[in-house]
């Protein structure tokens, strides 16, 4: 019997999938949880944990390490609505054994659970290696970007946020009670520190690394 | 399926639904039909499987949202589970469950005469609403033209 824990905050889906799993030969539903907090109390004695990434109190990947420390032979199947490569790579890096998009059918989920329960990998060794390489590269890029962003002063961050809201130099100057020429000086400094050539590139960089949000 | 709209617009909401239910043609409840066209597919598939287990007398059909219009015309559902609010026109003749709009936890359930929001929507809520719609449309004692 493959003992399965479902961690998913959309309750009707979780319950329905739980019913589908409970009728599946070879699978035993041993727990359900809506939050990370609740899931932490139910990790013991689980063979396969099916975990949603977006939970009300955090990210599902935060469960992967504690799950493995309690169940060294257990497997994690991430089920997500996200198509973000960052999310996928983070899950792989932390030790997820498989990842399915929520657009998959129930038969795909059942098949993945059976395969993981039988000790199979959902990724081939070559795919896993490639994913790990990508994860390392992305982490290195993220760290390099963070280093550049740390060079910005608090005032330069304010200018960048104002730029993201669509303000002109004159608007930014008025908003921050500084001169237009000072705004231009800050802009030049931002471009140099972020190693980009235009305001648009600076904005894309800032958005990509969650420094500003576009309204 | 031809529904006759109740002219009693001032009755309380639930009574309004009952009057509406009473106005159905006699053949409407020989087979209660539920169409699931919600996204994502894993939700749709799981709900369909679970509902078939829990309500074996009801006919359930799951279809891709892109086919919703076609299936509504051919399957003629009494209740539609969906995630695209745009499908709910003002003159729809079916009841509906709008499930987790914009990724929220809530659902909005509606009949042709009323709607309500349900926070933290679970399977019991879905079954309760399904049974309520089925009972109002097909319940004993309600025949065509019954005055409530």
Image: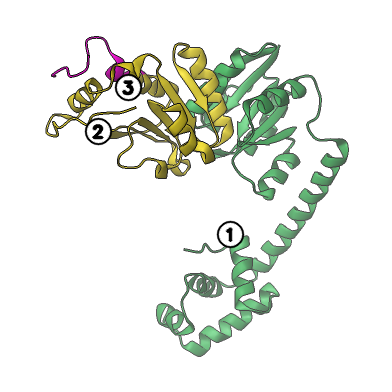
Chain colours: A green, B yellow
The quadrant the N terminus of chain B occupies is: top left
The reply to the same-chain question for discs 3 and 1 is: no
Residue in the picture at 60% in, 14% down: A22
Give left or right: position of A68 versus B145.
right
* Label number found at residue B113: 2
Q: Nearer the viewer, residue B134 or A183?
A: B134
Q: Is residue A187 visible?
A: yes
For the residues labelled 3 and 2, the Cα–Cα distance comes to 12 Å
N-terminal-most mark, 3 or 2 = 2
- Write down the region rendered in magenta: B131-148
Q: Which residue is mark 1?
A: A210
Query: How many labels sit on residues?
Result: 3
Q: Which residue is mark 3?
A: B133
The quadrant the C terminus of chain B occupies is: top left
For the residues labelled 1 and 2, the Cα–Cα distance comes to 45 Å
Please report, as a chain letter, where disc 3 is located. Answer: B
Q: Residues within 10 Å of mark 3 (few under 14, many from 20)?
A: many
């Amino acid at each position: 019997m493959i003992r399965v824990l479902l961690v998913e905050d959309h309750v009707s889906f979780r319950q329905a999938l739980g019913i589908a799993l409970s009728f599946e030969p070879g699978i035993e539903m041993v727990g359900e949880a809506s939050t990370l907090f609740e899931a932490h109390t139910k990790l013991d004695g689980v063979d396969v944990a099916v975990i949603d990434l977006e939970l009300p109190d955090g990210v599902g990947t935060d469960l992967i390490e504690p799950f493995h420390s309690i169940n060294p032979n257990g497997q994690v199947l991430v089920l997500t609505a996200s198509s973000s490569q960052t999310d996928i790579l983070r899950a792989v890096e932390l030790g997820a054994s498989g990842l399915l998009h929520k657009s998959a059918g129930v038969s795909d989920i059942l098949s993945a659970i059976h395969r993981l329960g039988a000790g199979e990998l959902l990724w081939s060794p070559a795919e896993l290696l490639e994913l790990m390489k990508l994860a390392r590269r992305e982490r290195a890029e993220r760290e390099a970007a963070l280093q550049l962003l740390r060079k910005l002063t608090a005032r330069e961050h304010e200018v960048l946020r104002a730029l993201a809201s669509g303000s002109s130099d004159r608007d930014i100057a008025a908003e921050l009670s500084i001169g237009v020429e000072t705004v231009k000086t800050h802009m030049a400094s931002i471009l140099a520190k972020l190693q980009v050539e235009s305001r648009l590139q600076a904005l894309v960089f800032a958005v990509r690394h969650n420094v500003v949000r576009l309204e | 399926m031809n529904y006759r709209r109740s002219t009693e617009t001032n009755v309380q909401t639930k009574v309004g639904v009952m009057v509406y239910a009473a106005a159905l043609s006699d053949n409407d409840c020989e087979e209660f039909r539920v169409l699931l066209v919600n996204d994502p597919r894993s939700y749709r598939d799981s709900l369909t499987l679970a509902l078939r287990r829990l309500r074996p007398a009801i006919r359930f059909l799951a279809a891709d949202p892109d086919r919703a219009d076609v299936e509504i015309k051919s399957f003629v559902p009494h209740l539609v589970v969906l995630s695209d609010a745009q499908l709910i026109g003002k003159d729809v003749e079916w009841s509906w469950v709008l499930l987790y709009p914009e990724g929220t936890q809530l659902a909005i359930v509606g009949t042709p005469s009323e709607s309500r929001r349900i926070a933290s929507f679970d399977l019991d809520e879905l079954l309760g609403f399904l049974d309520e719609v089925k009972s109002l449309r097909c319940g004993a004692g309600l025949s065509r033209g019954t005055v409530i």
